Image: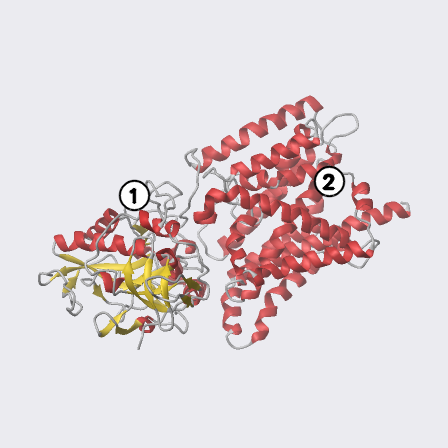
Amino acid sequence: MTSAAHGRIAYFDNLKYILIVLVVVGHFIDPFSKIFGVYQGLFFSIYLFHMPLFVLVTGMFARGLIRSDGRFRIARVLQFLLLYVLLYSGIYVLEYLAGKPVVFTPWSVANASWYLLAAAIWYLLVPLAARIPLIPGLVGSVVLALAVGYLPFVGDVMTISRVICFAPFFLLGYRLEPEALQRFFDRSIGWKIAAAALLAGAFAAPFLWPRLLKLRGLLSARNSYEVLDHFAAAGAGFRAVWYLSAVILGASLLLLVPRGYHWFSTVGQRTLQIYMWHLWSLRALALIALVPLTAMWASASPLAVVVPLAFALGAAHLFALRPPFGLVSERILSWGRGWTISGPAAFRLALATAVLLPTAAWALSGQPLTLTTSASPASTPPASPPSRRPASELDALTFDAPLAGATGFATSRIRLTPAAGLPGGTLQAGEPFTIRADQGDTWIVVAKSSGGALDPRAALINLADVVPSLVLSVETAPSYRSGTAILDQGTWSDADLVGINARFATRLPTVPVSLATAQKVQLAQRAALAEGNTLIVYGSWRPEAAQQALAESLVAAYDAQPGVREGIDGDGWDLAWFLPSAADSAPYGDRLELSLGKLSQTVRPWTPGEPYRSTQADEYAMPSSVREMSRAAVSTINPPGPQQPAASAPLTEGARRLIGYCRGAGLSVSPSAWWLFEDHQARSWQRPADVSGLMITAPR
């Protein structure tokens, strides 16, 4: 081996070392990102570029699949398929040994073993890619990747989304000469400094602009644009920006990769065994409750933050040992090494794969072949979700009590426009104000030290101020629970929203909701009152930190208590359906926790100057207690798929009436909780705001 070749090989070994370390770190820190906020930003920055570059390298070293005599090395495809089945099966064996319910569906890849299946598919398509010129192939693959996100069936089935979305990088790598690439990125120190600055900026960006984290679901290339929620229509634009970022950051890393052999060069030669073993070990650690144990330690010591990173770096280097960890993968990669098929046969096989693979993915997904421009991943969306529109285009509705005089809250920092003789000013996130006048698409408001006009889409309103017939049981709401396990919301409690109500001059719970949601609750309450019933409100808004604490508490209970797992898993349900997260709608004011009561006396219309109507009602028998987070509270027999409603679960009369009133008003019941109602239209109507730090408290 010449020194030039020696250096060339070392360069790519060093690159693969860096990439596999990033892969392992990304996988290990992801489960801890809700415990340690720093990992959310680190995960985002890694996923901006590491997999596109990894796939580019995969394509670059696929050039040898077509021999000089035109025959195709089919053995490599079969080897990677076998490695995929082995990795996937190993994960499920661990699940089985841990007593988890196991459904073996290797055609639907919901875990990180997807890369091996995708690589086998890309290898299978090489004879087709070899006949397409670089520019048309690259442009066509990018256009396809941008367009495919609008199809709802795109996802885990046959890992079709990732195959298509990363295909441009594989094609580019396949056309690049390794020697030429190494020479191109052998630049002066000035280039390296600029590259380092770009990478440093990429890792700093999510901490400087936390809103970037909302795009995290896009970076896995696993999902359709539904994951972008009300930004789904612009999904192609976001993906294009991601591709551009991946190219720039990938090029920056290529400039910084060390030349020559180093102690880590050998590790870079063994990425496949590291990839497989770190996934097995990560799943094993998850099954022994490493995440909740670390969360408990984190509450006692800040040193806990280093645990996931230490495990990741240790795994990346430990699993490079050969033996023992390379024995299985090396044996498989040596199996059938000489198997080839003719060039024409390989081309026909590649063409059939290109046609049949998406067709099979669509058929196995069971999804309709329609475009998607909005999302509601946690529950069944309305049949015809309304398009985004200004406040003045909300359906005209008169509340029982007028908007003028009601209390509202800013969802973010808002600059008030001078109006109606008021000087303007600035509202801070969570700051209360009083609505002086409602002008449709504008509210004239007065706050403690400012006053002026604002857009109602940037605010929440106190529901109790405009629908004064609701039974407000926020203060007496039961604890969240899953079976016998009581769940924790952290330092925040429902009592933080109980205080003196300015309109009624009495102590009442504050119920912050969006204007669009308040309208729907008003309609549902009128339907209930007409039949001698009333809605009972147990909760609405809560801060993101409380939502995260609740999620962590449920995970800890699920991992530690077999009874909780038994109450959650089964009939297609799993923890994800019951797990609240920061992405939940609670901080946005477009969800409510409701029950239904039978009126014990007639409710007469409220008139200005009267106190809040303390409606008396006897609560109906319900399938479970409010805030139960297990299968005892589900509203459908099985989890629904996207745009595939599941059959209703057996419900009590009270639950059926409650759901009927709310659905008739435009609210959607959560499949996993008969008591949780969401307003999908409100999220698309509201002006997006970063609610991560929003805190609302009732006046004392």
* Tag nearer the camera, 1 or 2: 2
User: For mark 1, does the 10 Å Cα neighbourhood hold few (<14), some (14 to 19), or many (20 or more) residues?
Assistant: few
Query: Would you place residue 31 above or below residue 140 in this image?
Result: below
Looking at the picture, how far across and down is residue 552, in whole percent?
Answer: 45, 65
Query: Would you place residue 389 above or below residue 459 in this image?
Result: above
Q: Is residue 86 visible?
A: no
Looking at marks 1 and 2 on the same chain, the residue that comes earlier in the sequence is marked by 2
Mark 2: which secondary structure? helix
Name the residue carrying label 2.
60
Front residue of 102/549: it is 549
Mark 1: which secondary structure? loop
Name the residue carrying label 1.
647
Residue drawn at (12%, 53%) of the image: 531
Query: Would you place residue 187 above or below residue 446 in this image?
Result: above
Amino acid marked by disc 1: Ala
Q: Can residue 629 be seen in this view?
A: yes
Q: In which quarter of the image is the N terminus?
A: top right
Residue drawn at (36%, 49%) of the image: 390
Looking at the picture, how far across and down is residue 477, in whole percent?
Answer: 27, 68
Front residue of 543/689: it is 689
User: For mark 2, does the 10 Å Cα neighbourhood hold few (<14), some (14 to 19), or many (20 or more) residues?
Assistant: many
Q: Which mark is residue 473?
A: none
* Extreme residue in the left direction: 601
Query: Would you place residue 205 above or below residue 647 in this image?
Result: below
Front residue of 419/650: it is 419
For the residues labelled 1 and 2, say whether their Cβ atoms are less than 8 Å apart.
no
Amino acid marked by disc 2: Met
Distance from disc 1 to disc 2, alpha carbons, whole Å, reads: 49 Å
Residue drawn at (72%, 49%) of the image: 251
Left or right of 633? Residue 101 is right
